[in-house]
Image (cartoon, rainbow, N blue to C red):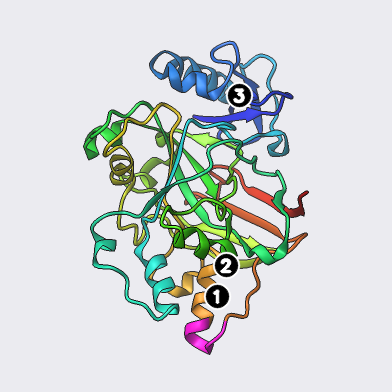
Amino acid sequence: MKLATLKDGTRDGTLAVVSRDLARAVKADAIAPTLQAALDDWDYCAPLLAELAAALEAGRAPHAFDFDPAQCMAPLPRAPGLADGSAYLAHAELIFAARGREPPPSLRREPLMYQGCSAPLLGPCDPIPLADEALGADLEAEIAVITGDVPAGADREAAAAAIRLFVLMNDISLRELTDADLASGFGFFHSKPPSSFSPVAVTPEEFGEAWDGRRVHGALRITVNDELLGEPDAGKDMHFDFPRLVAHAARTRPLPAGMIVGSGTVSNRDRRRGAGCLLERRAAEILANGEARTPYLRFGDRVRIELRDAAGRSVFGAIDQAVARSA
């Protein structure tokens, strides 16, 4: 099942069911007005949404219409929380190496995680707002899960059972503000503006065998101005799987339905797969040539992130957005 939130002039949009080929959609507001409302009452709403999805696939859904990603908000425009992890050690190790530092031993034992901006979140075609190119705007291609209610102290099995949906996420980062944030001792804040998300959120069964209950397998294709940045495989080299990340987020606090938990930049040890963010490419350039040559994002640059299945079909639709000057 694929779910989207359509722009309707409100902050939370209108819930819609989308066909598997991303061609058609139908409003689902008679079942739940918003995705958050559906998550709050998932056991009741999910079967009804699945019935509507089956009708849409069969061509029997009344009032179906052509699906347009440009008319989508983020699947959850206002999430109750967003926790972003760092599940791919290849990413962290490359950055540490470029800075001439050894990663801490704890890196392999506990996932890094920060609490990010959860509202408002950007839709797949919304501009990336940037006040100044000197801030070092970067993209970070990730997969994230959206949970149901997770009790504090939940183990991995309980965390796995609470995963409701998956989304693509562009964790937009302002690299020139990162060091100041970290130096404060309180972690990321100003360097992490709102992230953007894929047109649709999908339930686990949409992946078929590509979802093994722990990881999503498949390559994310990431381009900047139509130039390939990378095609890292999300299922490879993921040291901390999604149940582990959710359980880590819930270690000392309950997670409300609608919590978004991100994987961190998808990254592979095989550097022929390219990079999941500009910082990775710059780090590789520093190690190879002694200096970074790739610039961060500039006004007018276009970022595209997409995951296709083994048959070449787009799973989430694409995040496809341009950098625009903000006030």
Amino acid, disc 3: Ala
Question: Does 104 sit left or right of 260 as displayed?
Answer: left
Locate residue 276, reporting x and y percent: 51, 62
Q: Nearer the viewer, residue 174 or 38?
A: 174
Of mark 3 and mark 2, the one earlier in the sequence is 3
Which residue is label 3 attached to? 16
Magenta residue check for 184: no
User: Mark number for residue 278?
Assistant: 2
Would you name the residue on which mark 1 appears?
A: 282
Q: Residue at x 49, y 78 (%)?
A: 284
Residue 63 is left or right of residue 74, and the answer is right
Mark 2 crowd level (few <14, some 14–19, many ≥20, 10 Å Cα): many
Mark yes or no: residue 114 visible: yes
Question: Which residue is painted at 46% across and 48% down in the image?
Answer: 143
Name the residue at 70% across, 28% down. Answer: 7
Magenta stretch bounds: 286-291
Which residue is at the far front?
A: 184
